Image (spheres, rainbow, N blue to C red):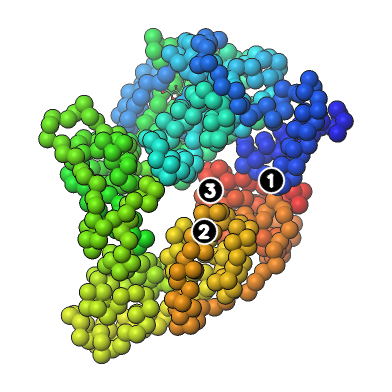
């Protein structure tokens, strides 16, 4: 590689990574990126004195710094006054209109993360500073450079402070905590703590691993000419920063209320946690006139969302035995309304977690309910203890079958394959919607079938007869026949449902589909090497499949004979391309028929879906795109025109 090539390669890599991290719009494959990256590394090893500051290799921090240096902000970082309801909003508006009648408002999400100040000079990122006390923060430039949605260079050459919030997306947060749980590490309470903790790591390679995301919300020292805030922000986004998932310029209280309601409604579908909406006067001149109180700006306010964290008391801890034998403790809490849902149970994950958090019966705790995940206890209020709290001992025997429990990593497991809880739960799972979808096999009936001795495993379901069922309490002819009919309907279903129904640990719906498509009936003889080359299937999953097949080969074959699932038609693998494996939605009038475009995308390995959701990777639009386009924009889905799609190919 020559020097010019090196410089070009860096530009290319930076463009790729901007599309990947900031625009959520990859324009190349990982493979291409990695190869070019590798060539750049090689060049840099040979020419260590020529390494450019904006090289992507300089993002991965691996130097351990000695604590952080204090660093003053060029201009103060303010906090915000909070309001909680329409009445609060009315009062704030009256107060604000008194200062200036002719104003409009810019509304954007209030992100729940850690605030960060970025200083750019001559278009280069020179400092990243935490908020600290608002006047002086900590210099964490090294860590900040590892955040991919922060451009290391921008087009704007005058000095500027760009302020925003560093967040961790909800799915990433769950992933980190799952990993920490497995390694027996302390869990992060919520995405905000995880973001703040990750930002202030002495070892910036840890920061780099955490997939932090920066969302800009304003400027400090301001060298921008725009007279309206929304224009200023638009300019900042155009420099290569992420846009908010939703924003609006509002003229009056009704418009403000309406966007607020919209954001509250959409809140769960956002990738990041929000704790409110920030309302800011849009006219910069009016902002300057209004100025600040000792603590907060007069021209902005935080309109908070209903809280997702509440305090409650642990009334009891019950033990659940799952189909894998894992015994999980669940807290029964004083019923508490969180954002419209009454929460009565919260997961305690495992016993290490109970010990680590020192959770006791009758303790006051903070619980978090966010989105569709199970509520969890994030903090014990030990200072509220009055002596009535009781420790909860780790069980030594299965609460259902009384056999001895064994510790496997962080889990305690019942080893008895015939334990009622294990069998009953595996039958319920076998019959559930994403498996064989058998109606009529609810908890009560499965328990009855088990206790009568008729069904000791899923295979026994297929030996049930009318005569046998009629001996059971509560079974008349019609009910018995219905059950037999629905069990019969489990036959001849798609093969992935069959695989999913086996209940192999770590193998869910997605992995079952992958395995079914890749191997068909040859699944049972798939080798380790073949399994791990499947998309999305790692070492642990492969081991789990192999172990399951080793132990249950006979049962699998027998079930397959009984159920006669359909073998999927094996598809040829599509070549690498930006749409492979992605979920795509089409909308509007395109240059070719939509059917033709759908067919082409499917040949490229994309899944073309009819409606936009969080799971959509791309929305491809033609002329006159309507509500699907708006929804996709709202959800932060990448929207590209059909021409752009063709260019990407
Ligand atoms: S504006 C001059 N906008 O909330 C106004 N802050 O409670 C200063 N925050 O320290 C702040 N999202 O860390 C603003 N869209 C947003 C925000 C936001 C999150 C945080 C920020 C600030 C805190 C104030």
Q: Is residue 528 above or below residue 14?
A: below
Q: Residue at x 20, y 43 (%)?
A: 392
Q: Residues within 10 Å of mark 1 (few under 14, many from 20)?
A: few
Q: Residue at x 38, y 23 (%)?
A: 93
Specify whether 391 is left or right of 580: left
- Which of marks 1 and 2 precedes in the sequence? 1
Task: State which quadrant residue 229 falls in.
Answer: top right
Q: Nearer the viewer, mark 1 or mark 3?
A: 1
Give the image location of residue 522, x and y in percent: 59, 73
Which residue is tagged 2?
543
Specify whether 639 is left or right of 440: right
Q: Is residue 68 above or below residue 420?
A: above
Q: Is residue 585 above or below residue 205?
A: below
Seen from the viewer's position, the closer of residues 554 and 327 is 554
Q: Residue at x 21, y 45 (%)?
A: 393
Residue 130 seen in the current view:
yes
- Label 3 beta carbon within 8 A of ligand 1: no
Per the image, label 1 sits on a secondary structure element best described as helix
Per the model, the C-alpha gap separating discs 2 and 1 is 26 Å
Residue furthest bottom as drawn:
467
Per the image, label 3 sits on a secondary structure element best described as helix
State the mark number for residue 30: 1
Per the model, the C-alpha gap separating discs 2 and 3 is 40 Å
Give the image location of residue 452, x and y in percent: 22, 78
Q: Residues within 10 Å of mark 2 (few under 14, many from 20)?
A: some
State the mark number for residue 631: 3
């Amino acid at each position: 590689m020559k020097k010019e090539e090196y410089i070009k390669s860096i530009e290319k890599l930076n463009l790729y990574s901007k599309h990947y991290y900031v625009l959520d719009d990859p324009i190349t494959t990982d493979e291409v990126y990695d190869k070019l990256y590798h060539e750049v590394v090689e060049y840099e090893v040979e020419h260590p004195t020529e390494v450019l500051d904006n090289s992507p290799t300089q993002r991965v921090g691996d130097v351990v710094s000695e604590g952080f240096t204090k660093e003053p902000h060029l201009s103060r970082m303010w906090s915000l006054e909070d309001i909680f309801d329409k009445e609060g909003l009315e009062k704030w508006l009256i107060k604000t209109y008194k200062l200036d009648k002719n104003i409009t408002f810019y509304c954007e999400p209030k992100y729940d993360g850690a605030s960060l100040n970025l200083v750019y000079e001559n278009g280069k990122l020179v400092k990243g500073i935490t908020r600290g006390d608002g006047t002086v923060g900590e210099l964490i430039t090294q860590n900040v450079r590892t955040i991919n949605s922060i451009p290391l260079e921008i087009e704007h050459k005058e000095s500027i402070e760009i302020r925003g919030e560093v967040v961790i997306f909800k799915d990433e947060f769950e992933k980190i905590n799952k990993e920490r749980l497995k390694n027996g590490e302390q869990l992060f309470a919520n995405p905000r703590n995880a973001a703040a903790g990750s930002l202030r790591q002495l070892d910036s390679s840890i920061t780099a691993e955490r997939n932090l995301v920066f969302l800009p919300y304003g400027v400090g020292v301001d060298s921008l000419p725009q007279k309206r805030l929304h224009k200023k922000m638009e300019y900042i986004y155009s420099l290569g920063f992420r846009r908010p998932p939703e924003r609006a310029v509002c003229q009056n209280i009704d418009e403000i209320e309406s966007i607020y309601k919209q954001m509250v409604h959409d809140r769960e579908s956002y990738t990041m946690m929000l704790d409110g909406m920030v309302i800011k006067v849009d006219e910069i001149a009016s902002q300057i006139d209004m100025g600040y109180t000792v603590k907060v700006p007069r021209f902005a306010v935080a309109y908070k969302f209903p809280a997702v964290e509440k305090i409650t008391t642990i009334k009891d801890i019950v033990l659940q035995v799952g189909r894998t034998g894992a015994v999980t403790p669940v807290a029964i809490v004083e019923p508490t309304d969180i954002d419209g849902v009454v929460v009565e149970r919260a997961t305690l994950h495992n016993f290490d977690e109970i010990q680590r958090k020192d959770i006791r019966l009758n303790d006051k705790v903070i619980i978090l309910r966010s989105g569709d995940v199970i509520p969890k206890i994030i903090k014990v209020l030990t200072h509220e203890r009055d002596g009535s709290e009781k420790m909860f001992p780790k069980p030594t025997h299965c609460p259902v079958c009384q056999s001895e429990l064994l510790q496997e990593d962080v889990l305690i497991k019942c080893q008895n394959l015939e334990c009622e809880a294990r069998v009953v739960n595996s039958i319920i799972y076998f019959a559930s919607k994403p498996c064989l979808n058998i109606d009529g096999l609810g908890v009560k009936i499965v328990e009855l079938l088990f206790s009568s001795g008729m069904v000791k495993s899923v295979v026994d379901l297929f030996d049930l007869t009318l005569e046998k069922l009629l001996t059971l309490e509560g079974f008349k002819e019609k009910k018995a026949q219905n059950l037999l009919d629905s069990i019969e309907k489990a036959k001849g279903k798609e093969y992935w449902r069959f695989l999913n129904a086996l209940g192999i640990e770590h193998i869910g719906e997605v992995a079952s589909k992958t395995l079914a498509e890749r191997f068909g009936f040859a699944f049972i003889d798939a080798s380790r090497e073949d399994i791990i080359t499947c998309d999305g299937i790692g070492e642990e999953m492969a081991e789990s499949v192999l172990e399951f097949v080793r132990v249950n080969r006979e049962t699998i074959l027998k079930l397959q004979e009984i159920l006669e699932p359909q073998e999927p038609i094996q598809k040829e693998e599509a070549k690498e391309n930006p749409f492979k494996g992605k979920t795509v939605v089409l909308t509007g009038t395109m240059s070719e028929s939509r059917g033709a475009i759908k067919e082409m995308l499917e040949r490229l390995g994309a899944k073309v879906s009819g409606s936009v959701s969080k799971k959509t990777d791309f929305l491809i639009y033609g002329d006159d795109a309507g509500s699907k386009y708006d929804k996709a924009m709202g959800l932060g889905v990448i929207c590209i025109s059909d021409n752009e799609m063709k260019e990407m190919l």
